[in-house]
Image (cartoon, rainbow, N blue to C red):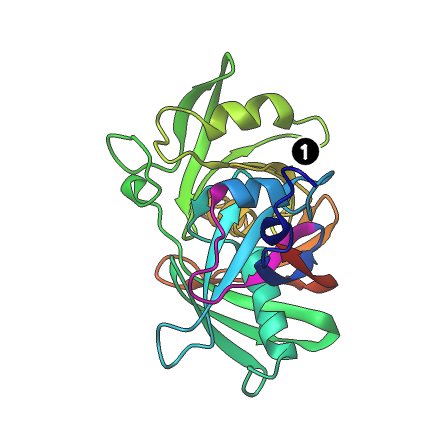
Amino acid sequence: MSGFDYELCFAPVTGIDFTKMHGLGNDFAVFDAPAGTPLDGALIRRLADRHTGIGFDQALVLEPPRRADTAVFYRIFNADGVEVEQCGNGARCIGALLAARGLATSGAVVMDSPAGLIRARLLEGGLVSVDMGPVRFEPRSLPFDAPAEAERYPLEAAGDRIEVGAVSIGNPHAVLAVESVDAAPVGRLGPAIERHPRFPRRVNAGFMQIVDRSHIRLRVHERGVGETLACGTGACAAVAVGRRWGQLDAEVHVSVRSGELRVNWNGPGEHIWLTGPAEVSFAGRVEV
């Protein structure tokens, strides 16, 4: 047959194993990626497509540990293919997966990430709790263009003048209070806040409705993804900001679109903990 390249047709294909997981619908493809795995931004975007790929909010890439006291080093890529610093629900899913593989000692495992060490605890009922580290309000930690640190910052977004709290949970968040998350203009304001020029690395935008001192409702527009069903670092950010405003207690139940997370934070200088379910949807192998 003229023009037929037999060797090309049967060229070897690289395969990468993955586990599809989610934390309250915030979904991930967790890839086991040995050195040299060709996972780049273009491939992540293709695999994130919910019609022609695997479909996910974030890709979590597991690499060999870089420290002897950790079980893994993980990287996070949003659905747009851009690598980011941290992911709360993703960390909980990785912790659950490592525990299922026998890598947790006494129900706990230590993981390494671009944002630092993350400690996970496996609890009863399929819950996973992760130590997300210290909370940082300094504008440079996000980064955020502001002359000085403040509890609230005025912002012009999509033609509206709003006030936000800005905080880093290993990744950047802007939180604004709303009377009702059901009526909040997440689709209009979320993208405008995400790409506001005062956030040079973009930002996650949280819309928080305070029900009482121990309960909030929350919707989050995640940078590079859009609105998700749940956002773990977004839940931590909202509680941290709400506590700084003097409106929340040390333990807060966070109602997201698909369930409930719990956040515990004793205040400045203390680490913030995120707790919720982590589940496996299916496992597979993708050819790249």
The residue drawn where x is 62% and y is 76% is: 122
**Is 205 situated left or right of 171 in this image?**
right
The residue drawn where x is 68% and y is 58% is: 20
* Residue 71 image position (x, y, % from top left): 47, 77
Q: Looking at the image, which residue sits at the far top?
A: 159
Per the image, is 176 magenta?
no
Per the image, is 29 magenta?
yes
Does residue 32 lie above or below 153 as drawn? below
The residue drawn where x is 66% and y is 51% is: 27
* Residue 165 image position (x, y, % from top left): 44, 37
Work out which quarter of the rendered image holds the N terminus and state it: top right
Q: Which residue is mark 1?
A: 181
Please tell me which residue lies in front, 47 or 149. 47
Crowding near pointer 1: few (<14 within 10 Å), some, many (20+)? many
**Is 174 situated left or right of 104 in this image?**
left
The residue drawn where x is 48% and y is 59% is: 37
Occupied quadrant, residue 183: top right
The amino acid beneath tag 1 is Val
Task: Give the SS element for disc 1.
Answer: loop
Occupied quadrant, residue 225: top right
Does residue 277 lie above or below 204 as drawn? below
Q: Residue 251: in sight, yes or no?
A: no
* Residue 229 image position (x, y, % from top left): 69, 44
Please tell me which residue lies in front, 51 or 100. 51
Q: Residue 54: in sight, yes or no?
A: yes
* Range of magenta residues: 26-41
